[in-house]
Image (cartoon, rainbow, N blue to C red):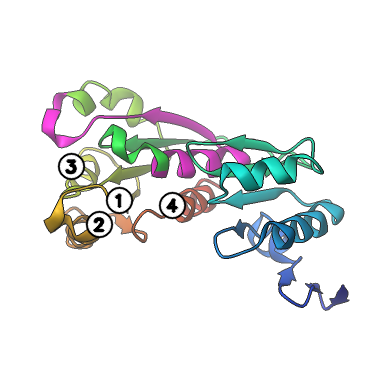
């Protein structure tokens, strides 16, 4: 292990220990493609430098392995996120709304919501309120409009983000999901719908990228 210019070089990873100073939160760890031993070593360095730990797309088996050493590690199985807070974030005054079109979008929505909460944001969830029953989101509009920023998670054709954006005055972060039948092309149809939204103020992240949406919303809410 070598420390140099704010970096910790592990051979297989080059950890950015100055990320928190620049962005307000420590480097998050994307777990797929890493061995459980690599994730453990990375986690120990982050925690050893008194920074908060956020592990994304972590499977249950690897969480159980890490929990043996990191007893305080918490896990949201739906979101696939594990986290350990060394120093709580200052509570943000603004609220973030996380909206999902359908129950099949919940894993991505929860990834966004948990990311926000770990970063010190107050989150309000509105789940299964897609355009097939548009009255469901309409009846929640008074609460939705209290948010400082809104995340909309939707698969299929992805129309919900445009609908919500046309009804509110704040930024909407749209998250296309891979939920849908064949012509959905694994989320591509929803992505293109969101990118082509005629409602101004819609920002779009990658397919199934709940973490990216949560992180972006946290920066806006800061």
Q: CA distance from mark 2 to mark 3?
A: 18 Å
The residue sitting at 53% across, 36% down in the picture is 77
Q: CA distance from mark 3 to mark 1?
A: 17 Å
- Give the mark, 3 or 1, whose residue is nearer the N terminus: 3
Asked if residue 157 is positioned above or below residue 4 in the image, the reply reads above
- The residue segment tinted magenta is 108-135
What residue is disc 1 on? 177
Q: CA distance from mark 3 to mark 4?
A: 18 Å
User: Is residue 37 inside the magenta stretch?
Assistant: no
The residue sitting at 84% across, 51% down in the picture is 50
- Give the mark, 2 or 1, whose residue is nearer the N terminus: 1
User: Do the residues under discs 2 and 1 have CB atoms within 8 angstroms?
Assistant: yes
Q: CA distance from mark 4 to mark 2?
A: 16 Å
Report helix, strand or loop for mark 1: loop
User: Do the residues under discs 2 and 3 have CB atoms within 8 angstroms?
Assistant: no
Q: Nearer the viewer, mark 4 or mark 1?
A: 1
Q: Residues within 10 Å of mark 4 (few under 14, many from 20)?
A: many
Q: Nearer the viewer, mark 3 or mark 1?
A: 1
Residue at the extreme top: 139
User: Is residue 134 inside the magenta stretch?
Assistant: yes
What residue is disc 3 on? 163
Q: Nearer the viewer, mark 3 or mark 4?
A: 4
- Give the mark, 4 or 2, whose residue is nearer the N terminus: 2
What residue is disc 4 on? 213
Give the left or right position of residue 6, taking residue 141 as reference.
right
Image coordinates of residue 22 in percent, x first then y, are: 68, 64
Q: Which mark is residue 187?
A: 2
**Image quadrant in which you'd find residue 44:** bottom right
- Give the mark, 3 or 4, whose residue is nearer the N terminus: 3
Q: Nearer the viewer, mark 4 or mark 2?
A: 2
Q: CA distance from mark 4 to mark 1?
A: 12 Å
């Amino acid at each position: 292990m070598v420390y140099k210019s704010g970096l910790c070089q592990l051979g297989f990873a080059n950890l950015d220990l100055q990320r928190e100073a620049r962005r307000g939160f420590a480097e998050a760890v994307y777990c797929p493609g890493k061995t459980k031993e690599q994730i453990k070593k990375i986690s120990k360095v982050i925690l050893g430098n008194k920074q908060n730990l956020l592990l994304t797309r972590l499977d249950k088996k690897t969480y159980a392995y890490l929990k043996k050493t990191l007893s305080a590690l918490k896990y949201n199985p739906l979101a696939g996120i594990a986290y350990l807070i060394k120093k709580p974030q200052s509570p943000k005054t603004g609220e973030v709304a996380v909206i999902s079109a359908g129950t099949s979008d919940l894993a991505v929505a929860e990834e966004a919501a948990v990311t926000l909460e770990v970063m010190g944001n107050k989150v309000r969830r509105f789940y299964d309120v897609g355009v097939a029953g548009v009255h469901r989101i309409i009846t929640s509009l008074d609460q939705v409009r209290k948010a400082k920023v809104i995340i909309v998670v939707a698969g299929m054709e992805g129309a919900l983000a445009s609908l919500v954006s046309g009804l509110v005055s704040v930024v909407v972060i749209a998250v296309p999901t891979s939920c849908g039948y064949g012509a959905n092309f694994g989320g591509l149809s929803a992505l293109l719908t969101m990118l082509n939204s005629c409602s101004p103020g819609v920002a779009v992240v990658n397919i199934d990228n709940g973490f990216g949406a949560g992180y972006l919303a946290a920066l806006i809410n800061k």
